[in-house]
Amino acid sequence: MSTAPTKSVLVGLDQSDGARAALDWAAAEAALRGARLTIATAWSGLEHEGPEEYQPNIAEPVHRAATEFLEDAAADMRKRHPGLDVDTSLMGDEPVEGLMRLAEDAGLVVVGRRGMNSVLRVLMGSVSQQLVAHSPVPVVVVPESTTPVVERGPVVVGVAREVSEPLAFAFAEAEFRGAPVLAVRAWTLSNPYVASNQEAVNGIEEEQDRELRSLVDGMRPEHPDVEVRTQVEFATAEAALINASDGASLVVVGRHRRHSRYGLPFGRVPHRVLHLSDLPVAVVPN
């Protein structure tokens, strides 16, 4: 995995409001990184919406409309971000396959998320979910209501034991923005009777704090100008991250390397944070 600024920022675009918010965010991110913005859209699936006998007549105008849609989006981003290197890709394969292929040469993939809904599972479309689960590079999921301006609020990152990739990504993002890092470690008790022993609770918190600071200190030499704060909280990881993200610019979580056969494709914590956060969330392969 690479977060080098020479790698492009790839954004998947369709006609939804969520995808448009993702495009705006991705363009601002690419400008921060000094990287190329690649806008990709798929058109092949559209030609299957009508009866089969009409497909030869439908394919050409659909392709032409998709080309114009993509070119208009690229022209808008060039106008709004002078000097930004903008490329386009009209994908002939399905969106997930096409974006996964393009992600091999990207440093970051950006996709949109639908607006809030009481049924959490409908917030993320299948494309976003598959990319988060399988992308070889970090994926940022952008809510529909996100401001297109990349603010200088802190980059909040959940830090698990023996996992450095999300923290490294958060430091790099904070450096791009001139923003601080807020590194969060959450912990809970498997044995509820320990909660009555304040000495034991204090010992656990101190151990968690030492581990977190040790991981953070390992990142400082490469990013000496990034201000860092640490926070250890007795809570579930997703609750701690959501609580810490007030006023933040980005939330960063790790994607598990392994998951159970019947579990979520990228882990419980990123799944819940993606659905509960009203900020862009970066999911980083561990």
Image (cartoon, rainbow, N blue to C red):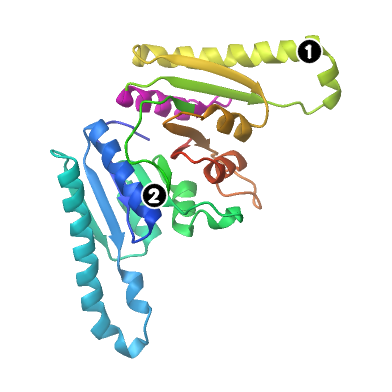
Q: Which residue is rendered at x = 37% and y = 41% of the image?
A: 147
Q: Position of residue 277 (x, y in %)?
A: 52, 40
**Crowd band around label 2 with a 10 angstrom C-alpha radius: few (<14), some (14–19), many (20+):** many
Left or right: 70 in relation to 124: left
Which of the pair 14/45 is nearer the observer? 14
Q: Which residue is rendered at x = 28% and y = 55% of the image?
A: 40
Picture layout, residue 29 above or below residue 192: below
Residue 200 bears which disc, if any? 1
Which of the pair 73/189 is nearer the observer? 73
Judged from this view, the residue extending furthest toward the left is 83
Judged by its main secondary structure, the magenta piece is helix
Q: Position of residue 285 (x, y in %)?
A: 46, 38
The question of residue 174 being in magenta is answered with: yes
Left or right: 234 in relation to 172: right
Q: Which residue is rendered at x = 61% and y = 29% of the image?
A: 240
Q: Position of residue 119 (x, y in %)?
A: 61, 56
Q: Is residue 105 visible?
A: no
> Callout 1, which amino acid?
Ala
Q: Is residue 270 visible?
A: yes
Picture layout, residue 46 above or below residue 245: below
Residue 111 bears which disc, if any? 2
- C-alpha separation, residue under disc 2 versus residue under disc 1: 44 Å
Q: The residue tagged with tag 1: helix, strand or loop?
A: helix
Q: Which residues are magenta?
A: 157-177
The question of residue 23 being in magenta is answered with: no
Judged from this view, the residue extending furthest toward the bottom is 53
Q: Quadrant of residue 55?
A: bottom left
